[in-house]
Image (cartoon, grey):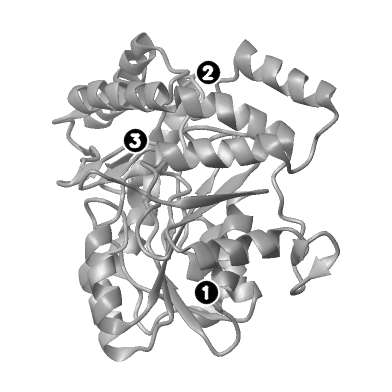
Amino acid sequence: MIPIARPLIGEEEVEEVRRVMLSGYLTHGPEVEAFEEEFADFLGGRVKTAAVSSGTAALHLSFLALGLGRGKRFLTTPFTFMATVAPGVQIGADVLFADIDPESFNLSIESLKEVLEREEVDVVVPVDLYGQPTQLDEVERLARKYGFRIVEDSCQAHGALWKDRPAGTFGDLGVFSFYPTKNMTTGEGGMVVSRDEELLVRVQTLRNQGQTGRYTYETLGYNFRMTSIAAAIGRVQLKKLKTFNSLRRRRAEILRDLLEGVDGVEVPIEVKGAYHVYHQFTIRVKGGRRDALAEHLKRKGVGYGIYYPKLLYDYEPLRRFRPREDLPEARRATEEVLSLPVHPGVREKDIYTIADAVKDFFKQQRG
């Protein structure tokens, strides 16, 4: 089986974990601080950073730092992972949804404008889905016009760029996830980044039980700290990230060329202004044949993913936030998307196997 995702952990990571474990300093400390500094440098030194226990924790703390809560509203795409929305709703805020752009799968700027014209919004959360950034400069421009704050969800976009600026560095706060399927991993973990030092201090306080110093509690906080073990893995993975992303882009380029022109398949594009890092290579399968193709790939030993089979407001916990009218592009995406493996663990010859399996399906369909 060619898996849809696989973390690449080498001897370097194992040795660094061993070093940290033998040091006896296993929780937040110098190792985490070093990782934070190195990640900030990776983003061009534009931001300060705060390492946390997960991407979900990063979103949760970012919302709290901006004062989101009861009586407040945030807006995002319904075509994303539940963690984009759940923390905001859990702290009492209401969520609004805008439609997606059919080419990028990201938040549609036009749909966002339409919602902003009729609704008051406190925070907007653009999601850099599949490794491709949103039109982030346009989101910032709208923020200046309408007065909302921005939390950029870059949990799938480590190393991506929008107009040569790193994803995660737009708006007020950016967040990353280091879950094992991401472009780099710490096992579990996340990062909050911001150019606003005051916001970062709030995040740092909230992640550590609300303490500004030992037993000095400024607020009621959380234990959302990153462990030193996770940071040690992250420091090694970060050194490999550019290579990992280059391999993803190369595999995506080959697979795109092989599938270009296959009747019934629409291959993903890199929109103008974006540097796509292909957390996922997501095709559209036309004619209602997506699920049949998925079954065919399974029989052929090719892994796949459907990200995402439903919109967030289809799920019971969020149904009360369903918009008055269904969002057509987001809905169409749930019916057509299928992700194929392009991660660094996939060999180039495997890419040809994947493409042949897809072509074989449509050849059989034609009879």
User: How far apart are labels 1 and 2 at the CA level?
Assistant: 44 Å
Residue tagged by mark 3?
Answer: 277
Nearest to N terminus: mark 3 or mark 1: 1
> Split into 4 quadrants, where in the image is the C terminus?
top left
Residue tagged by mark 1?
Answer: 66
> Relative to the observer, which residue lies in front, 61 or 70?
61
Q: Residue at left 46%, top 43%?
A: 40
Note whether residue 292 is visible. no
| Label 2 environment density (alpha carbons within 10 Å; few <14, some 14–19, many ≥20) | few
Nearest to N terminus: mark 3 or mark 2: 2
User: Quick one: SS at disc 1?
Assistant: loop
Kindly indicate the quadrant of the structure image that contains residue 213: bottom right
Q: Residue at left 40%, top 74%?
A: 149
Tell me residue 61's x, y (percent): 61, 64
Q: Residue at left 30%, top 62%?
A: 100
User: Quick one: SS at disc 2?
Assistant: loop
Residue 56: assigned label: none
User: How far apart are labels 3 and 1 at the CA level?
Assistant: 29 Å
Kindly indicate the quadrant of the structure image that contains residue 244: top left
Of badges 1 and 2, nearer the viewer stands 1
Of badges 3 and 2, nearer the viewer stands 3
User: Quick one: SS at disc 3?
Assistant: loop
Nearest to N terminus: mark 1 or mark 2: 2
Residue tagged by mark 2?
Answer: 1
